[in-house]
Image (cartoon, grey):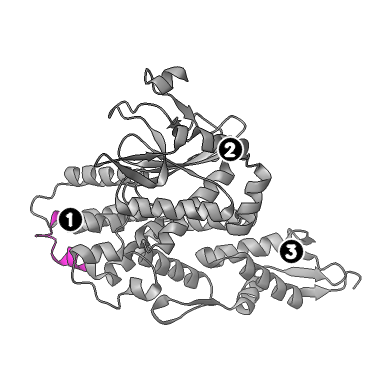
Amino acid sequence: MEAHVSGLRTIAIYTVAEDHTVGFGMIDFDSKTAAAKERMLWIKNYLKQTGLPSYIEASGSKGYHLWVVFKARIHAAKVNWLLNFIVKQAAEDLGDPGASELGKYNWIEVNPKQKSGAGAGNAVKLPWGIHKKTGQRTTFISENFSKEVNGKLVADELPNHGLDTLDAQDPITSEVIDEIIAEFCPMPTESEEAAAKKKRDWEHSEEFQDLAVGILCEKCTFIQHCRDHATTLSEPHWWGMMRQLLPFGEPGRRKVHDLSAAYPKYTERETDKKINDCLKATDKKEVGPHTCLTVKGFFDGCPEDCWAVGLGVASPAGMAAHLAAQDMAKARTDSISVGKKGKEVKVNCVVLAEEIMKTDKFATFEDTDEILVYRDGIYQQGGQIVIKKLVEERLGTFSNERRANEVIYHVKVKSYCNRNA
């Protein structure tokens, strides 16, 4: 540590231990702009409202680090969940639609990134060292960021480099973090996580992706502009088109080639290279689909009442995903009804229960409320689980715990029987 503080070497540590715990959380702001400072102070204030102190560190380079020090060991999954939730809240409260849709900013990174200690994970540079590239010392500073000394702006450092402030902080236990999460951002239950996985599986299917690509080409004025002006399309417009299509897997990739082929200098090899570059950047969270707000900044042909606006989603890709999920669900069940421009989706759980009971037999004992399902010539236990799976299969994205429980209720009512009969 003496070598680190003296600048002879720079030490970084892995954030997550083998027992899946961390001793701190850190949000990395890779920017010193006024917008970055505003968002950092918003997050710092939100943390304060939860009862968590946080400390601003000038990174020695082009940004800041916001540290939350526990002085105890906390499960990494809880810290990752809490900090990512707060960053998303900042995006929504401060009106950053693109960041809100992605749940994060391109220039804000939450540590720990991992939720467990499996593998080495990512490393974080310790405070009070010398930045190797700039030669500047990292130091803890006040919320003013800087102060004027002899006519020059310098970092407004905390007394004794922030050591006294950190030393005075009380330990933050796992129980305290559990209480904060329960009050501000409850973690999903196992059933909610299973539903989220079902949604991801559905949205990764080629059927879903094909539908989404078709909808995007049919309903997005910007994509239609790119198609109709393919021979003269500008590079920024072409990249914008590609960012909307590539989230939809291989069908999206094929459509990029299809819409690019008319360009006089088009080659399959060069287009594939650019697609792969875009996908790599997306995987690193550097880019994503342009929001409608961004598209309107370089394309003035977007109508005010476009489908994305009507649905209340942030991007053309989000619009296509939402409508594709509706189409898939409607193809599987007659219980789905959709309002004008697809904004309001309703599920008639009575109809859905009747559909399920036409394909599977159930019996519910009056004395125990237990649902049995008919399998292999006999009634067996596990009827409630079967119904939940069937609801998920039919509703996909629109399946949730409340709707599944309502269907279960209607199946019970229609299948009550006396076990002694």
Q: Nearer the viewer, mark 3 or mark 2?
A: 2
Q: Nearer the viewer, mark 1 or mark 2?
A: 2
| Start-end of magenta stretch | 224-236
Work out which quarter of the rendered image holds the C terminus and state it: bottom right
Q: Nearer the viewer, residue 103 or 68?
A: 68
The residue to which callout 2 is attached is 168
The residue to which callout 3 is attached is 373
* Image vertical order of residue 306 relative to residue 401, above or below: below
Residue 120 sits inside the magenta stretch: no
Q: Position of residue 135 (x, y in %)?
A: 29, 27
Q: Nearer the viewer, residue 100 or 409?
A: 100
Please state which amino acid type lies under the numbered disc 1.
Answer: Pro
Res 148 quadrant in image: top left
Please state which amino acid type lies under the numbered disc 3.
Answer: Val
Residue in the image at 58% along x and 63% along y = 392
The residue to which callout 1 is attached is 236
